[in-house]
Image (cartoon, rainbow, N blue to C red):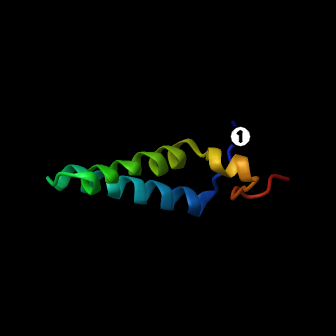
Amino acid sequence: MANNVGGIDKILRIVIGAALLVWFFVDQGTGFWHYAKLIGIVPLLTGLLGTCPLYSVIGMNTCPRKV
């Protein structure tokens, strides 16, 4: 898969994903909303890998243009 996640997008994904996962492990709640925080895995992984499958499907790219 080609990289399609650019700088600011990548940083935001990593920060938001990490924050949700930290919140999951710090908060000792139960129920749906507690486990819904695990969705943070998705932006964290897409930020770290630099590729987003949804961006590929809709043809979006936030990487700087390569000359």
Can you identify the residue that label 1 sits on? 2
Q: What's the residue at 33%, 58% (across, down)?
A: 19
Position of residue 31 measured from the top left corner of the image (x, y, whole percent): 21, 52
| Residue 28 image point, x, y percent | 14, 52
Indicate left or right for 5 with 48 as reference: right
Of residues 46 and 27, which is closer to you in this image? 27
Quarter in which the N terminus is drawn: top right
Residue drawn 34% across the image and 48% down it = 38
Q: Please identify the residue farthest to the front as the structure is shown.
A: 32
Q: Nearer the viewer, residue 1 or 36?
A: 36
Looking at the rendering, which quadrant does residue 27 occupy? Answer: bottom left
Specify the amino acid type for callout 1. Ala
Q: In the image, 65: left or right of 56?
A: right
* Residue at screen point 45% across, 48% down: 44
For mark 1, does the 10 Å Cα neighbourhood hold few (<14), some (14 to 19), or many (20 or more) residues? few
Give the left or right position of residue 17, taking residue 64 as reference: left
Residue 12: percent from left, percent from top: 49, 62
- Secondary structure at badge 1 equals loop
For this orientation, the residue located farthest to the left is: 28
Q: Residue 7 at what x, y percent from top left?
A: 60, 59
**Rendered position, 65 above or below 49:** below
Of residue 13 and residue 55, the one placed in the foreground of this image is 55
Residue at position x 67%, y 51% from top? Answer: 55
